[in-house]
Amino acid sequence: MLRKLLVANRGEIAVRVIRAARDLGIATVAVHSDADRDSLHVQIADEAVHIGPPAAKKSYLNVASILKAATDTGCDSVHPGYGFLAENAGFADACAAAGLVFVGPSGDAIRTMGDKVAARSAAHAAGVPVVPGSIGRVAGIDAARHVLIDTGFPVMIKAAAGGGGRGIRIANDLAGFEAAFPQAAAEALAAFGDGGLYMEKVIARARHIEVQVLGDGRDAVHFFERECSLQRRRQKVWEEAPSRALSDRVRDELCSSAVRLARAVGYSGAGTVEYLYDDESGQFHFIEMNTRIQVEHPVTEMITGIDLVAEMLRIAGGEPLRLRQSDIAVRGHAIEVRLNAEDPCRDFAPFPGTVTALRVPGGPGVRFESMLYAGYTVPPFYDSLLAKLVVHAETREAAITRLVRALSETRIEGLRTTKPLFLALAGDPAVRANAVHTRWLEGWLETHAARLVPEPEP
């Protein structure tokens, strides 16, 4: 077992990892920027080290400072959380070179699955269905035109090194394609330092389904699927598990394919294999793999009763995968919503500030993952995520009812949050009927945003 862990992150995920480590008897070290000196993860860790100014590139992305903090405090391991350096193969390699255990996959696995084109190739080789398009990078616009013969329109042009919904263009005809291709290449180069592109057919009205996997480098298991179809600007806002859109046959095929891919790349730690699912054809297509723990992992923990972060730490400490597939079962239904420091009544304008009062929801089947406390000042330098509200119940309908109750109990005073959006969505007939897809929410917002009930003035 690991002895002392440095958590190379901030916010609610740093709090989450620290708690899991301490439950296992592992000492913890937090790192923080100037802006996070009073953050909750700093307060609850056994030790804390200052690593730089507020700008992420000078603190949470500063590999040298993080490694120095780990070695100076006698750590034997590093957990990257999600975001920042979590999917940085160079960081994983640097940890290994410094004699530190990186809690996650190897640098080689991150390189393979983090490059969207390499990941498609690996999935194709493992017999996992991929979205029709280019198997490899397209070598310029002339080669891209040939791919159109298979994909047709609309087509998606995507950055090979992209992520988080960035570096994407959709073309609906040849003229739009000719204009979008060089734009996508320039944006990819500016955002990721890599102008490489690949192409995928746009699947209309697709659902976003992802499978949680866990491996030890030799074997892997799955924890069933999550549905993340409610998205705004390709960013997930509401996640649930399991997906009520899948038949038992499709679920089995989907989850088995994710395990097959994880085994093929020698995956270690927690990861997520993501797919698009077409309701009309009943077919699923691999799109990418996230080589880290994800924001929405608590919904999977709620339906399986398994602490995924703890399992990551056990595997990183040298234990073999202790779970067999037959040990993992689904119980009930879980939903997670992301409470961000944004005002949905004003086009999701950022709303950092000081939490003047906080009331956390509770009761059966309610989980509130956050770094908030009364008096905490939310800095403007990082992601706007304040808290994840997760509910669990026997059925999806009961989970939605519980979500409304928990949202009504939640009070985060002093700033605006996305709570009004989720109260409205929970009451929407299409959401209750699960009649949604990845583009549904943006269309809904065009007609419903003006009707959202704003929170009281801070």
Image (cartoon, helix red, strand yellow):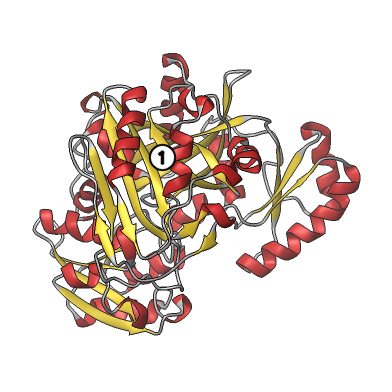
The mark total stands at: 1
Q: Residue furthest left?
A: 25
On-image quarter of the C terminus = bottom left
Relative depth, front residue between 293 and 380: 380
Seen in the picture, residue 395 relative to 378 is either above or below; the reply is: above
Residue highlighted by disc 1: 262
Q: Report crowding for label 1: few under 14, some 14 to 19, many 20 or more residues within 10 A (C-alpha).
A: many
Would residue 5 be found to the left or right of residue 146 on screen? left
- Does any portion of residue 317 appear in the rendered image? yes
Give the image quarter of residue 352: bottom left
On-image quarter of the N terminus = bottom left
- Residue depicted at 81% across the width and 53% down the height: 180
Would residue 424 be found to the left or right of residue 3 on screen? right
Residue 204 x, y percent position in the rendering? 68, 30
Q: Residue furthest front?
A: 457
Residue 250 x, y percent position in the rendering? 47, 19
Residue type at tag 1: Ala
Residue 130 x, y percent position in the rendering? 60, 34
Residue 29 x, y percent position in the rendering? 20, 72
Secondary structure at badge 1 equals helix
Give the image quarter of residue 59: bottom left
